[in-house]
Image: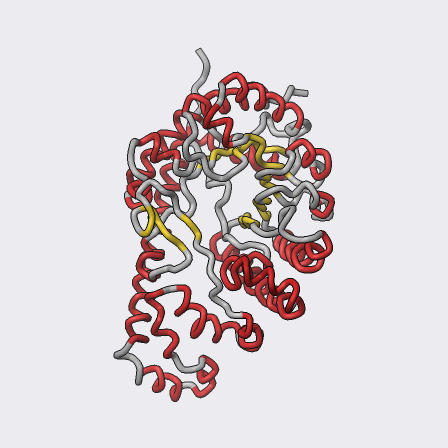
Amino acid sequence: MGVTKTADVLGAERAQRIRDAMQLKQPDRVPLIMPIGYMLADMGSITRQQLLEDPELRQQLLEKAAMEFQPDSIHGPIPSDPAPHLILGDRMTVWPGHGIDVNTQFQFVESEFMKAEEYDAFLEDPTDWVIRTYLPRAFAALDGFANMPPLSLFISGSYYLGSVGALASGPLADSFKAFARAVEAVAKSIERMTKHAERMAALGWPDGFLAGPVLTAPFDMMSDALRGMRGIMIDIISRPDKLLAAEDKVARVELDFAINACKATGATRAFLPLHRGSDGFMSLKQFETLYWKQLKEVLVTLVENDITPIVFYEGCWDQRLEYLAELPKGKTVGWFQASDIFKVKEIVGDTMCIVGGMPNSLLKAGPAEEVRAHTKRVCETVGKNGGFMMCTAVGEMAGSNPEFVRVWADATKEFGTYAKT
């Protein structure tokens, strides 16, 4: 009879397996990363709204899935807490049961919250513009911030407080109260997440693979949150110099946030989902000038501050892989959605840990034999010599068939084991 390992031992083994792969080392076997997401609702026969709004039930389902599939890392839907967004009337998001069907997953709604003529105001004083112009547009409950006196008046000290006080009984006061409620909701969510992480650790699972601050490419931040797809594509042609200047400011803000957040929490990783840098969005010349230079500086700066960037290269990056080979070796992680995973291994396998390899469609439709065969090929080719973590191509497993997920998990452990030397 074999010796049963304790949760502490299993957790240490899983954490070490992931660390080794991230550092381009060869662990005992290929780590299995499972972003199970809304599949938990399917497994629990509940709506996706229930999954998000009942955190205790969500945690129970996550623990059950972890025990059943035995991955090295597992996490539920991201983001998972609609409360602060609903409190603020977030116009950038819609949630199951709030603007969309109870079984539709969270959606990001892109809008042109920053007008083309506002670049100068943004560049002159981004903090003032964000608080008094952007936030009232992006969050319904913060409409009152538009009534706030210019923040630069803080230079007058107590005189400024008097100006704010004159508005304390109107929309501005309501917005401050809503903001305070949202902050309280975030604090409760963090407290709950900490307790849930402790429960996962007690079962043998280390901190989540994506634990740490979230940021993105400066171009994507300008596009996603401020200018929108239409606006940013016009800016590429009509005002590239102002776009570049704005990206520089965004990069400094994001890096300051990420570095300080990691210092405060002890986190050693940052997650960067990329949206507009893939093949087809812009020419290679535009990519070099408007996207890659700024993204590379962000990634290198994170590395210089002992933070490992985990980058989700959304879409297909086959035409951009040579650029990724410029990154510091063994210091970043690349999660690839639609790129040719075998080409990725060939070009950047010596540069970064590769994550991905399993098409979500296979876990939905199978058949089991194809799931097993594909897992074997990926483990033996992309996983050769280490530096690889098996994962789905998309960070969400909604609609996956548990039978095929089980085949995938078992096959990864069978074919991803490295021979002892």
At a point 36% along the width and 86% down the height, the residue shown is 163
Give the quarter of the image for residue 103: top left
Residue 300 seen in this snapshot: no
Instruction: Provide residue 197's location: percent of width, then percent of height.
Output: 39, 41
Assign the C terminus to one quadrant of the image: top right
Residue 262 seen in this snapshot: yes
Nearer the observer, 214 or 404: 404
Apparent side of residue 133 relative to residue 418 in the rendered image (left or right): left
Apparent side of residue 364 relative to residue 199 in the rendered image (left or right): right
Instruction: Provide residue 270's location: percent of width, then percent of height.
Output: 54, 50
Give the quarter of the image for residue 216: bottom right
Give the quarter of the image for residue 182: bottom left
Nearer the observer, 334 or 260: 334
At a point 57% along the width and 72% down the height, the residue shown is 119
Apparent side of residue 288 relative to residue 62 in the rendered image (left or right): right
Apparent side of residue 262 relative to residue 329 in the rendered image (left or right): left
Q: Is residue 28 above or below residue 276?
A: above
Instruction: Provide residue 328's location: percent of width, then percent of height.
Output: 70, 47
Nearer the observer, 294 or 226: 226
Q: Is residue 12 above or below residue 230?
A: above
Count of numbered badges drawn on the protein: 0
Q: As drawn, which residue projects farthest toward the top?
A: 1
Assign the N terminus to one quadrant of the image: top left
Q: As drawn, which residue projects farthest toward the left?
A: 169
Instruction: Provide residue 351's location: percent of width, then percent of height.
Output: 70, 41
